[in-house]
Image (cartoon, rainbow, N blue to C red):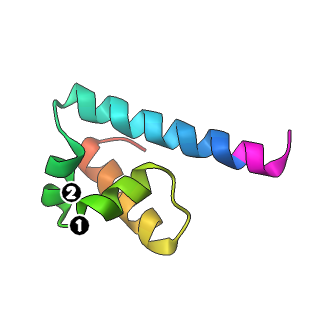
Amino acid sequence: MAVEEQLEQAQQAVERKIKLALLDKSMTQAELANLIRESRSDVNKAVKGGTLPKDKEIREKIYQVLGIK
């Protein structure tokens, strides 16, 4: 499997895990963004598996709030 394919699969897995946790808590991305004090667009980029350091920082906040890791 090519490296890019592995990266894409990992990004999709992260997105799935976060979206399932949001559903489980009956929470929207907008509510999550407000809760962690980040913009909706930044939260969306992080959820989609962005690779910038800020995306990782936001995901850490998301994992903590949603109780996932």
Taking the view exactly as shown, the residue that stands out farthest to the top is 24
Q: Quadrant of the N terminus?
A: top right
Return the residue at label 2.
33
Task: Specify whether 48 is left or right of 65.
Answer: right
Q: Is residue 31 magenta?
A: no
Question: CB atoms at circles 1 and 2 under 8 Å apart?
Answer: yes
User: Residue at position x 34%, y 64% from top?
Assistant: 42
**Which is more N-terminal, label 2 or label 1?**
2
Q: What's the CA distance linking mark 1 and mark 2? A: 5 Å
Give percent across and percent down for residue 17: 43, 35
Give percent across and percent down for residue 18: 37, 39
Give percent across and percent down for residue 7: 68, 49
User: Residue at position x 35%, y 29% from top?
Assistant: 20
Q: Amino acid at mark 1?
A: Glu
Return the residue at label 1.
38
Q: Which residues are magenta?
A: 1-6
User: Residue at position x 46%, y 49% from top?
Assistant: 48
What number of labels is visible?
2
Helix, strand, or loop for circle 2? helix
- Which residue is more in the foreground, 25 or 41? 41
- Which residue is more in the foreground, 57 or 40? 40
Quadrant housing residue 27 = top left
Q: Amino acid at mark 2?
A: Ala
